[in-house]
Image (cartoon, grey):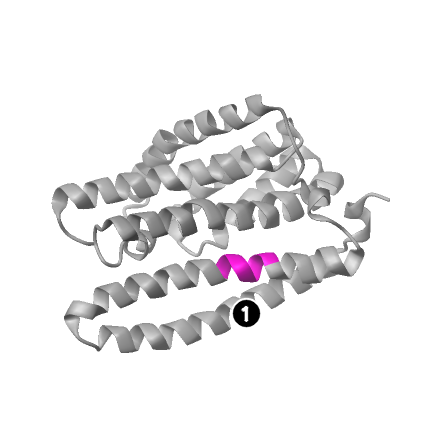
Amino acid sequence: MDWRSRVTAGDLLLFLIVNLGALRLMALFFGGIAGAARGGRAEHGETQMLVITLAVIFFQSLILLICVHRLILRRHGLSWADLGLVSCPRAWIRRAVFVALGLMPAVAIINAAIPRLLDIPFDNPQVAALAPAGFSWPALLGMIVMGGILTPFAEEIAFRGLLYGWLRRRLGFGAAAIVSASVFAVLHGVAVLIPALTLVGLALAWIAERSGSIWPAIVTHAAFNTFMILTLYAALSQAGQSF
């Protein structure tokens, strides 16, 4: 029996509630630590904020993977392969990197256009979160590992492997791609980024659909995040300041 007929809408709702609840508790815990760090000595505050930010990214991804495993896979006797962690032709891995490169200017254009069309300032809190201590090589390496590798791995399992895969059987490719991409964008919690992140989600659904595996989507997502992090830290290196 296809796993998508065994997993119900109630399972997905439970997954969402538990995951968001766990993330909320984590945010409260680390928020208290961050408040103490900001009130501490200035020379140590930025380093502490970097460590806290990396810890938050790590635990967000860990919570997501634990929820997928405990609430979906283990509950229904499924494996990670059922969610798309299967091998694919190597050509798709190369294509995945080119898709990421193509997304960068597209996302930049959308992010520049939306504030102008809506006559609102462009405020992306993710920029400050990715570089809380300004430029340093340990910060850059840590962000690439956590934000450029771990986060895409966990998010692709949840959004393309689980959500898109479940919707694909019921709605077909187009509607499933749009719905999963929209949820992906909205759950990032930054309203001005929703159009650009929806485009990214659509591209990730497309490459997962065409390749028959979520590995290329993981590579595209990881490459995109890593390119963005490198661009940000290159700008910080030139400016010699933090956001």
Nearer to me, 218 or 117:
218
Amino acid found under the numbered disc labelled 1: Ala
Residue 195 lies in quadrant: top left
Residue 85 vertical position relative to residue 64 in the rendered view, above or below: above
Q: Is residue 161 above or below residue 102?
A: below
Name the spot of residue 57 as percent of width and height, x first.
43, 58
Using the image as rendered, state which of residue 45 and residue 180 is in the foreground: 45
Q: Residue furthest right?
A: 1
Residue beneath the point at 65% across and 57% down: 68
Give x and y (percent) for residue 141.
33, 48
Say which residue appears at 58% left-offset and 64% top-offset: 19
Query: Label 1: which residue?
Result: 22
Graded by Cα atoms within 10 Å as few (under 14), some (14 to 19) or many (20 or more), the crowding at tag 1 reads some
Q: Which residue in the rendered view is the most extreme toward the front?
A: 138
Examine the image and state in which quarter residue 64 appears.
bottom right
- The magenta region covers 60-65
Task: Determine whether, in the image, residue 139 is placed left or right of residue 240.
Answer: right
- Quarter-of-image position of residue 106: top left
For image coordinates 25% across by 48% down, the residue present is 137
Against 46, residue 106 (above or below) is above
Is residue 147 among the parts visible in the rendering? yes
- Chief secondary structure of the magenta span? helix
In the drawing, does residue 211 fall left or right of residue 181? right
Image quadrant occupied by the C terminus: bottom left
Image-based side of 207 in relation to 14, left or right: left
Give residue 84's position: percent from left, percent from top.
67, 40
Asked whether 165 or 131 is in front, the reply is: 131
Q: Looking at the figure, which quarter contains the N terminus?
A: top right
Residue 152: x %, y % from top left: 49, 46
Q: Is residue 77 above or below residue 198?
A: below
What is the tally of numbered marks visible in this picture? 1
